[in-house]
Amino acid sequence: MNFPKHIAFIVDGNRRWARKKGLSDIAGHQYVADKIIEPLINHCLKLNIPYLTFWAFSTENWKRGEKFAQAIFMILRKGLKKSIEGYKKAGMRLKIIGDLDKLPSDLVSQIKTWVDESKENDKITVTFALNYGGRDEIIRGINKLLKEKKEKVSQDELEKYLDTFGLPDPDLIIRTGGDKRLSGFLLWQSEYSEIYFTKTLMPDFNPEKLDQALKNFQKRQRRFGK
């Protein structure tokens, strides 16, 4: 079977899911953290898909207010703390991309510890994009280059300064929630990614839904410009 090496998720539809059920806006995000992420990781492990990325908090999400942001950060603290030992035993390597400078210092410190503790694991690399935006990533990479006073830069050189250095570009990007756009997600890395849009809201996106996306992917012809 032709499976993608790297699947990346634009996580969307959490608030709509919660509102349909008469719950608080944050309830959808909590449900995804509690009930959806781990089964998807385990399913990818079973299928020997080695890279999985979730866009958990974008640079634009600050517009939803400080209260929303802090609620998301608390979900991350509790969710990772609860699951990290099991993830590590399963051979998961944790990676974080995005501008961490604006995140709470205690969360950043804990994340860096978990990243370091799991760095030798090689069954699957799970990346969470936190305070991430595609343009922001590219600008930060360029600024790092400017500090080194590079006069001429190749694509390969710039990639070394991006958050995703060391990760393969995503073969498949899945956006839940019905919208059909990338919204700035992995702008540099998505050049030849296959895009799968689904109306399914993220809290309803289970391994069976992932299998549907994979079957669709297997029907695609990937020519990479040839």
Image (cartoon, rainbow, N blue to C red):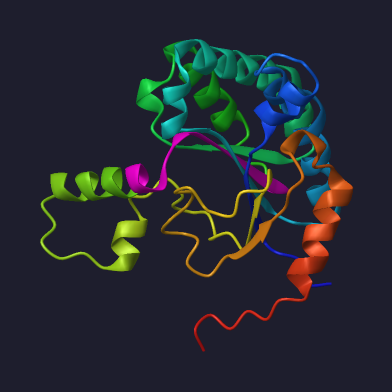
* Residue 160 x, y percent position in the rendering: 35, 55
With 48 as the anchor, is 179 left or right in this view?
A: left
Residue plotted at (49% across, 84% down): 225
Residue plotted at (58% across, 19% down): 72
Residue at the bottom extreme, as displayed? 226
With 105 as the anchor, is 195 left or right in this view?
A: right
Q: Which of 48 and 169 is in front in this view?
A: 169
With 168 as the anchor, is 33 left or right in this view?
A: right
Q: Is residue 97 magenta?
A: no
Q: Nearer the viewer, residue 213 or 115?
A: 213
The total of numbered circles placed on residues is 0
Q: Does the magenta stretch include residue 136?
A: yes
In the figure, 71 relative to 134: above or below? Answer: above
In the figure, 182 relative to 172: above or below? Answer: above
Q: Which of 93 and 169 is in front in this view?
A: 169
* Residue 5 x, y percent position in the rendering: 67, 62
Residue at the right extreme, as displayed? 208
In the figure, 99 relative to 4: above or below? Answer: above
Q: Bounds of the magenta span?
A: 122-137
* Residue 220 x, y percent position in the rendering: 71, 76
Q: Quadrant of the N terminus?
A: bottom right
Residue plotted at (72% across, 26% down): 33
With 94 as the anchor, is 211 left or right in this view?
A: right
